[in-house]
Image (spheres, helix red, strand yellow):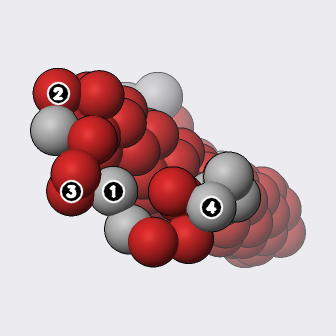
Amino acid sequence: MNSEHYYKMTKDELIEIIEKLNDQIEYFKEREEDYDERLEQLNSENERYSRSIHDYERKEKEEEIYRQFPQMRPLWMKKGFDY
């Protein structure tokens, strides 16, 4: 629409257009909130998985060290307990 068209519109037509635009703005604000919530969930899951991977890698390194140097095993591991 060009500016001449707006000059020819009635006040009610302009109000209707403004209301539609406000509805669109509200919709996009809600979508943004939804995306923010989902992003927060994904970040939380990512952090949890990163910690799990780190813990698993640390345990693998410890087990490799204990295989190479059995004398370094903690006493509770020597007694047959698993961690």
Q: Toward the viewer: 69 or 41? A: 69
In the image, what residue type sits under mark 2? Answer: Gln
Of marks 4 and 1, which one's residue comes earlier in the chain?
Answer: 1
Residue under label 2: 68
Q: What residue is disc 1 on?
A: 73
In the image, is 5 to the left or to the right of 50?
A: right
Q: N-terminal of the two: label 4 or label 2? A: 2
How packed mark 2 is, by other alpha carbons closer than 10 Å (few <14, some 14-19, many 20 or more), is: few
Q: 26 above or below 34?
A: below
Q: Are marks 4 and 1 in contact (CB under 8 Å)?
A: no
Q: Position of residue 28 (x, y in %)?
A: 64, 56
Residue type (three-letter) at the residue carrying disc 4: Lys
Identify the residue position indicated by label 3 in the image. Answer: 72
Instruction: Specify which label sits upstream in the sequence, 4 or 3.
Output: 3
Q: Amino acid at mark 3?
A: Met
Q: Residues under labels 4 and 2: Cα distance?
A: 18 Å
Q: Nearer the N terminus, badge 1 or badge 2?
A: 2
Q: SS of the residue at dot 1?
A: loop
